[in-house]
Amino acid sequence: AFISLRQLLDHAAENAYGVPAFNVNDMEQVLAIMRAAEKTDSPVILQASRGARSYAGDVMLRAMVGAAAEMFPRIPVCLHQDHGNDIDTCLSAMAHGFTSVMMDGSLREDAKTPADYDYNVGITRHVAALAHKIGVSVEGELGCLGSLETGSGEAEDGHGFEGSLERDALLTDPEQAADFVARTKVDALAVAIGTSHGAYKFTREPTGDILAMDTVKRIHERLPDTHLVMHGSSSVPQDLQDRINAHGGAIPQTWGVPVAEIVEGIKHGVRKVNIDTDCRLAMTAEFRRVLTEKPEEFDPRKVLKPAMDAMEKLCADRIEAFGSAGHA
Ligand code: G3H
Ligand code: 13P
Ligand code: ZN
């Protein structure tokens, strides 16, 4: 059954757990997540980026997720727009039955240029007012996602910002977060704590100087009733990097966000944890392995089935680690 993000995260807060939000683009990813949810008895957040919506098509995405809800009737499903860049994107998502939208006003409409605070407040408040009329939840974002390792921000498409920003200027400011939530009425707030999207987050195991978990704690102290969202939360597991590279891949050594750090965040108000890259890595490791071990194979199902199974396992692992198992 479909459920809004607000309903889902309120339950998570009452019971002190976090919910992974996995990106979906195709049937295999939808099935992998739903099977993991069914096995672990967990609610799920399926999120679609603008890229996912244009890849599959809105009608196909809506139908796939609708089919998933029908196949797994016990599992509460939130269908969420990931990184909406303008009002139209959020409105069209609502028209297609999404139960939650992210209005990412931390960036301008081009989804590249950092936006000023007043723009972010204005557009996010507008989307929240519209969405709340029809029971749809809204996630906002404050601060700039991007690696703190280099001391310069990185826009969400991986291109560096112009100039270099100070570490503190990139992180979400707790006082400003309180003002932002009060003025926009968002249901959940994405915070910037030094993570970035994609596989290349850190060049070493992240420690306190590059992953600002202390900022999560300070925001949670200031806003104990606000559901916090961690973007860029893939862990980029070493074994997946190794498996891809053992079968012809060329992924330079990299580090993601350790699961233990996310679990620490969940103790301090993090309720939604965005994961896309790890699912991509899990599937690609199997694509590479199967096609390398069986070069004569050409039935897509022989590649997609093990990839789906690998993603299911990864999703179940995160569901267990974040404590949402048993809460469907
Ligand atoms: O926000 C980033 C997500 O990983 C979605 O990526 O825009 O390539 O679908 P995408
Ligand atoms: P990863 O690239 O770390 O999986 O982050 C995904 C994300 O934040 C989607 O919004
Ligand atoms: Zn994100």
Image (spheres, rainbow, N blue to C red):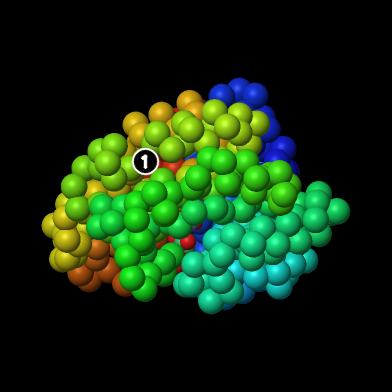
Q: In the picture, which quadrant includes the N terminus?
A: top right
Q: Is residue 102 above or below residue 309?
A: below
Please, what is the three-letter code of the amino acid marked with disc 1? Ala
Viewer can see residue 84: no
Q: Residue at x 54, y 67 (%)?
A: 115
Question: Outermost residue toward the top?
Answer: 15
Q: Decide which of 106, 79 is in the foreground and name it.
A: 106
Q: Decide which of 14, 238 is in the foreground and name it.
A: 14
Q: Is residue 283 above or below residue 317?
A: below
> Count the marks: how many?
1
Spot occupied by residue 243 in the image (x, y as percentages of width and height): 19, 53
Spot occupied by residue 319 in the image (x, y as percentages of width and height): 47, 35
Spot occupied by residue 5 in the image (x, y as percentages of width and height): 67, 44
Q: Residue at x 49, y 67 (%)?
A: 114
Q: Residue at x 55, y 61 (%)?
A: 106
Q: Decide which of 285, 87 is in the foreground and name it.
A: 87
Secondary structure beneath disc 1?
A: loop
Q: Left or right: 328 with respect to 231?
A: right
Spot occupied by residue 211 in the image (x, y as percentages of width and height): 33, 42
Q: Quadrant of residue 265?
A: top left
Q: In the picture, which quadrant includes the C terminus?
A: top right
Task: State the residue position of label 1.
Answer: 212
Q: Is mark 1 within 8 Å of ligand 2?
A: no
Question: Outermost residue toward the right?
Answer: 133
Viewer can see residue 180: yes
Q: Residue at x 56, y 71 (%)?
A: 108
Within 10 Å of disc 1 (Cα), the crowding (few <14, some 14-19, many 20+) is: many
